Image: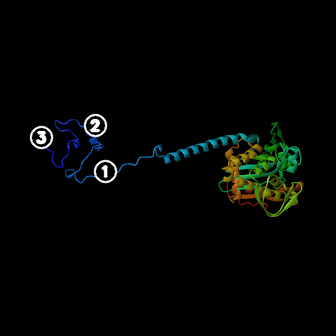
Amino acid sequence: MGHVQRPGGVPPQARPYPGPGEPPLPPELSPRRVAQGGRGIPTQTGPDRGGPQSPPLPPTAPRPAGSGPRPNWRRRITWTAIILIGALLVTSVITYFWADSKLNRAVDLSKVIERPESGKGTNYLIVGSDSREGMSAEEKKKLHTGSAEGKRTDSMMILHVGDNGNTMISLPRDSWVTIPTFRGSESGRMFPASGGSKLNAAYAKDGAQLLVRTVEYNTGLKIDHYAEIGFAGFAKIVDSVGGVEMDIPKGFKDKNSGADFKAGKQTLNGEQALAFVRTRYAFAGSDLDRTKNQQKFLAALASQTATPSTVLNPFKLYPTMGAGLDTLIVDKDMSLWDLAEMFWAMKGITSGDGKSMNMPIAGTAPQGSLAWDMTKVKQLVKELKDDEKVTVTGNR
């Protein structure tokens, strides 16, 4: 009897296995394909299959010829970010080693004898010298530096960086101090104390090491790092950042420094900035008034230099760093991180995060010098050593 297909039944080609006497199923209808969900199996529905016929799927629109696969934007963005970060890291490392190689670590503080004990925080001695090294006769004339041989300290400041606020203390170069016994920086010989003298005489006598020794001896405060810059370097830094804006409350002139300023806000170039920080005779020869101007300007310079517009702009960053590092003299243990900390602390003082003051003065001393108020000085040093908030006030 022949095979009779039931109405609505499953045709042989839709069954997973062939019946008796039927030819083998093609590959797309093999049991494995059926076990995988019946992909590729032509199915029919009807009363026996549980419902009406399913509508056919709409055809997929063909992609335009030559269009290629769709771009994976997430992957592209990820790789772009990785490449940019990698380039930034490489540039940062190169910049670090370039800048580190330009630091002139010429001052060896390990040769300073009889040093005080270290306190909390970090103390920087920042010195502006009247060095004319490398300057042409035309530059000396333009900057009103004169042609004196050797170099002396034109400004001195102690910058204390701590957890309870940063403090900048100007040391008038006419301060009357004791120059103690010291070991010669070049000869290594011991020299006896020379008694009372103006503070800037220490530097003139044996340079940075004797200056550090004298400051430590007269204050009892240990100096952790030393930084010094000369006339030419100072002017170049100011010019490299496009000048520094200052608000001068009262105009003044000084033929010795070349100063000629009117009151009000103005942008000082390198030449004008040097005249501004060197002027003293316009203030009746007062070294205290000059130190106030020096603090005010250096804080403004640090504030303007340490900005995203300078740090993130290589056309401003590299000339500024080059101008500063080429003429900066530091101690052998000074790192770029220490130098950055120093500048950021100076910037913080400008924004009100800290205190600036002169060393407390009690009155006049021999040779028209200034005598420190030692009672206040001892209290100030104790607060700095303990990294406490400074409550001592200096002369304004």
Q: Quadrant of the C terminus?
A: bottom right
Q: CA distance from mark 2 to mark 3?
A: 27 Å
Which residue occupies the foreground of this view, 148 or 238?
Answer: 238
**Among the two numbered marks 3 and 1 on one chain, the one whose residue lies closer to the N terminus:** 3
Q: Secondary structure at mark 2?
A: helix
Residue for badge 1:
56
Q: Among all residues in the image, which is located at the extreme front?
A: 65
Image coords of residue 173 (percent x, y): 83, 52
Residue position marked by numbered label 3 in the rendering: 2
Give the Cα separation between the discs numbered 3 and 1: 34 Å
Would you place residue 359 above or below residue 73 in this image?
Answer: below
Q: Which residue is mark 2?
A: 27
Residue extending farthest to the left is 1
Residue contact between numbered discs 3 and 1, judged by CB atoms under 8 Å:
no
Choose the circle earlier in sequence order: 2 or 3. 3
Question: In this rendering, which labeled residue sits more in front, label 1 or label 2?
Answer: 1
Left or right of 337: which side holds 294?
right
Kind of residue at disc 2? Pro
Crowdedness near tag 1: few (<14), some (14–19) or many (≥20) residues, C-alpha within 10 Å: few
Kind of residue at disc 3: Gly
